[in-house]
Image: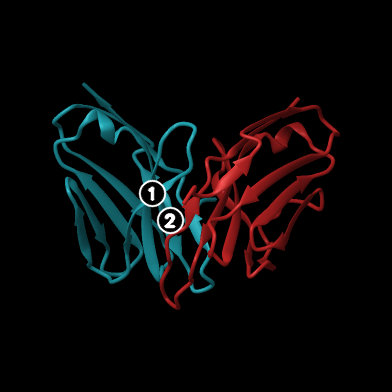
Chain colours: A cyan, B red
């Protein structure tokens, strides 16, 4: 059983459209991270959110941490083919270990 | 910096054989993590080290799995004997600091794709 549930599992959109990926849990985390993984490579950290209600922007990507620090969302505006990949959320507990969600596979069609 | 280096990138072996996966962390990083990724279970933490000492191995699935870190620049994950259900991508990651209530960046290697026939 995953501590973190990601939805949707798969997402296929046209270039220029917007998308949102969700990461939910019944557990409280000290921080939450989002990673992107491309085929044949390891995950690469995009952002870390720490404070409940925090919103961080990274160019066209907007990350939000829920007020209760149990959930998070990733919103991509005007998606591009380069945004294609597996998006993983990971929650950090007080023992510093990361628990990963199963991931959302995003495909942006040109 | 070359990043985290893993070898081999691909390994195909037969059931019952011993498999050794290798990792060189980023120089100066004092935390090293081993993960396993499968379609069914996603990315799972197997074990992590701090200053070459194993801190938490609760994710190691069975006694067939063992990990060592003889020095700051090298770690191995060994499976003996290997089984088909061990087929997965194994990632090594390293980090420089684990702040209280926070999580520092873990840098992942490219992974080793293991196939056990």
Label 2 to label 1: alpha-carbon separation: 8 Å
Q: Is residue B79 left or right of residue B92?
A: right
Element type at marker 1? strand
Say whether residue A30 is left or right of residue B44.
Answer: left
According to the picture, the residue beneath numbered tag 1 turns out to be A35
Label 1 marks a residue whose chain is A
B16 w.r.t. B50: above or below: above
In the image, residue B102 above or below residue A41: below
Quarter occupied by residue B54: bottom right
Going 49% across and 66% down the picture, which residue do you hit? B96
Q: Which is nearer the eye, A9 or B76?
A: B76
Image x and y of residue A90, in percent: 43, 56
Vertical comparison of A99 with A94: above or below? above
Decide which of tag 2 and tag 1 comes sooner along the chain: 1
Q: Residue furthest bottom?
A: B100
**Where is residue B81 drawn, in percent x and y?**
84, 40
Residue furthest front as drawn: B1
Can marks 2 and 1 be said to lie on one chain? yes
Q: Quarter of the image for the C terminus of chain A: give it.
A: top left
The mark lying in front, picked from 2 and 1, is: 1
How many numbered discs sit on the rendered protein?
2
Q: Residue at x 64, y 58 (%)?
A: B73
The residue positioned 41% from the left and 68% from the top of the image is A29
| Residue receiving disc 2 | A90
């Amino acid at each position: 059983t995953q501590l973190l549930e990601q939805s949707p599992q798969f997402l296929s959109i046209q270039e220029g459209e917007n998308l949102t990926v969700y990461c939910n849990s019944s557990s409280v985390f000290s921080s939450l991270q989002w990673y992107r993984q491309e085929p044949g490579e390891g995950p690469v950290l995009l952002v870390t959110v720490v404070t409940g209600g925090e919103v961080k922007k990274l160019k066209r990507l907007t990350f939000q941490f829920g007020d209760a620090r149990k959930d998070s969302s990733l919103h991509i505006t005007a998606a591009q083919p380069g945004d294609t990949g597996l998006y993983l959320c990971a929650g950090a507990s007080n023992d510093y270990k990361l628990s990963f969600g199963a991931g959302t596979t995003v495909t942006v069609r040109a | 910096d070359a990043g985290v280096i893993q070898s081999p990138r691909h390994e195909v072996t037969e059931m019952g054989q011993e498999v050794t996966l290798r990792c060189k962390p980023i120089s100066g990083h004092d935390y090293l993590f081993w993960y396993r990724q499968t379609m069914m279970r996603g990315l799972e933490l197997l074990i992590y080290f701090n200053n070459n000492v194993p801190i938490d191995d609760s994710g190691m699935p069975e006694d067939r799995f063992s990990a060592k870190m003889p020095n700051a620049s090298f770690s191995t994950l060994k499976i003996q004997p290997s089984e088909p259900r061990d087929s997965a991508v194994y990632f090594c990651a390293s980090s420089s600091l684990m702040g209280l209530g926070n999580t520092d960046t873990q840098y992942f290697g490219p992974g080793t794709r293991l196939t056990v026939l």
